[in-house]
Image (spheres, rainbow, N blue to C red):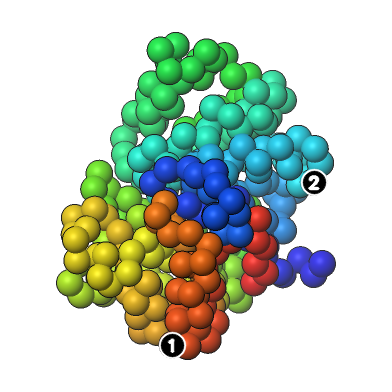
Amino acid sequence: MPEHIWKLKFYGVRGSIPLCAPTISEFGGNTTCFYLDLLVKQGAEKVIVVFDAGTGIRQLGKDIMSGKIERAENILIHFSHFHWDHIQGFPFFAPAYLPDQKVTMFSPHYLNQESGKLKEIFTRLMQSEFFPVQLEKMGADMGFFTSEEFQKVLCLDRKVKFRFMEHNHPGRAYSYRLDGYGKSIVICTDLEHGDQLDPRVVEFCRDADLLIHEAQYTDEELLSHKGWGHSSFSQALEVAEQANVKKLYITHHDPDHDDDFLRKVELQCKERFEHCYLAREGEEVYV
């Protein structure tokens, strides 16, 4: 594969809570986790780039352990925020138990504050009342970044620009954007625009080759879920249109939306925006 092609794989596209039922087998039941292969290295060091650690990260870990995904010295995990459906898979991420593995976690929530604040979140997540193995006993070399110094870790060959932006969600959440090699990817999940689109989000997504934008609700459902921190399908489409995005993948599917419902919504979305897709667990997208 040419090195200028990036690959993103959806390991979890469900919102709020994981599901297991025959009626959601096509789109999947695992919560948010995306894997991005930038196909660049720092010297001889390969990295694995991950966004969020919902239950989907368990299968990502299995793919790394089995060799389906090439092992990397460093696994970089970016967090949009820390609600359960975006962190609950981390204790089951097998590579984090390997003594020769580096796992580097980043969040802008405590920007330029002590990294211990970020570490404390995962220490609490894995305290003995909740999980039998504590964070300090997992085995991997854990790193925690809360400053823009993380840019130096991610932008391995200085050809990839990494940005983030806070957007509206209870407890605060962040969008991410990567630009490099003439292409761009934007991830906006757990985002509530309000009565009108957030113009900052539109500008952040400007001319992206690939936009991953959440849409948990229909327009009708959104009316009764104001303040819940999520968008509608039509809002995701409008962002893509206004920002001149080339390809849109909608994610964070509501637990009450089964395969039949999501297939119908996808067809309706494609009538308005041709290159729009509803993300499916296990699907790979190339940019």
Q: Is residue 234 left or right of residue 27?
A: left
Q: Nearer the viewer, residue 51 or 86?
A: 86
Q: Is residue 178 visible?
A: no
The location of residue 166, given as percent across then percent down, is: 30, 56
The location of residue 278, given as percent across then percent down, is: 52, 68
The residue under label 2 is which amino acid type?
A: Lys
Q: Is residue 214 above or below residue 153?
A: below
Total count of labels: 2
Residue at image position (65%, 55%) is 282
Sort mark 1 into few (<14), some (14-19) or many (20+) by Cα contacts within 10 Å: few
Residue at image position (37%, 72%) is 233
Q: Would you name the residue on which mark 2 appears?
A: 68
Picture quarter containing residue 23? bottom right
Q: Is residue 108 visible?
A: yes
The location of residue 216, given as percent across then percent down, is: 37, 61
The location of residue 25, given as percent across then percent down, is: 60, 54
Residue at image position (32%, 69%) is 218
Q: Is residue 165 left or right of residue 127?
A: left
Sort mark 2 into few (<14), some (14-19) or many (20+) by Cα contacts within 10 Å: few
Q: Is residue 227 above or below residue 91?
A: below
Q: Is residue 45 left or right of residue 263?
A: right
Picture quarter containing residue 67? top right
Q: Are marks 2 and 1 in contact (CB under 8 Å)?
A: no
Residue at image position (47%, 34%) is 88
Q: Is residue 151 above or below residue 193?
A: above
The residue under label 1 is which amino acid type?
A: Arg
The earlier-in-sequence mark between 2 and 1 is: 2
Q: Nearer the viewer, residue 245 or 63?
A: 63
For label 2, the SS is loop
Q: Would you name the residue on which mark 1 appears?
A: 272
